[in-house]
Image (tube, rainbow, N blue to C red):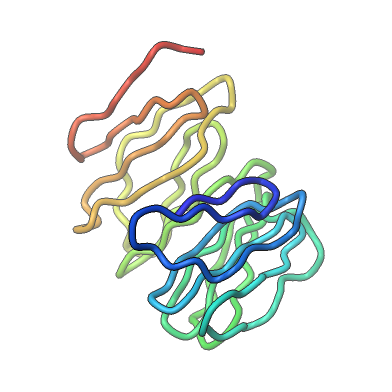
Amino acid sequence: YMLDAFGKVFTFGDAEFFGEANLDDAVDLEITKTGYYILDKEGRVHDYGFIDHYGDGPLDEYVDMELENQGYYLLKKTGDIISLGNVIPLTGINMDNAVDLEITKNGYYILDDNGIVHSFGEAKQFENIFLEDLSAKDLEVTPESNGYYILSGYGNVYSYNAAIGFYGPEI
């Protein structure tokens, strides 16, 4: 699956199409076995398929969504986390440049646009990279939660206690 900024969902291979939003501010797509959610920048959650809607965030600027068994978390650009559904509430961090939230078995991470990874609970802290150009876009934790990757807006992948990263020319 792939989501564009206007809420259009692109499917590949055998992925099932459930619908798409007509937006100008889609920020995240989260996929389940029976549907998917699209988060818009203002905190509205659009659900498609056979899935439960647990609510929307209060009006603000949102950057990411993470699913849990009976609910989901919405990350604001300010580092605040909104917990919706039957999930354990999480505490954010006061910042103005959050870009991604990743949940692990025993904790969670918030990535800021400088490439700094903030760890919470028992999530292991590894190295950080400081990206002066504010290009950090995504954080992915390894399946064993013993490392992570940071994706920059230039397509570079920085790895920490994980397999090798991928670095391309600066665009």
Position of residue 17 relative to residue 102, above or below, is below
Q: Position of residue 85 (x, y in %)?
A: 57, 85
Residue 105 sits in which quadrant? Answer: bottom left
Counting labels gives 0
Q: Is residue 30 above or below residue 35?
A: above
- Say which of 74 and 33 sits in front: 33
Please tell me which residue is depicted at 37% across the width and 65% down the height of the picture: 107
Q: The N terminus appears in which quarter of the rendering? A: bottom left
Task: Work out whether residue 21 or residue 102 is closer to the camera in this orientation and state it.
Answer: 21
Judge from the rendering whether residue 153 lies leftward or rightward of residue 34; answer left or right: right
Rendering coords of residue 18 (x, y %): 54, 71
Residue 86, above or below 37 = below
Write the residue at 75% across / 54% down: 61
Report x, y in % for residue 53. 61, 83
Residue drawn where x is 47% and y is 37% of the image = 116
Splitting the image into 4 quarters, where does residue 128 fall? top left
Q: Which is more toward the observer, 152 or 80?
A: 152
Q: Position of residue 88 (x, y in %)?
A: 49, 81
Vertical arrangement, residue 49 with respect to residue 62, above or below: below
Q: Is residue 35 left or right of residue 105?
A: right
Residue at position x 42%, y 45% in the image:
139
Which residue occupies the foreground of this view, 75 or 168?
168
In the image, taking residue 59 as reference, residue 118 lies left or right, namely left
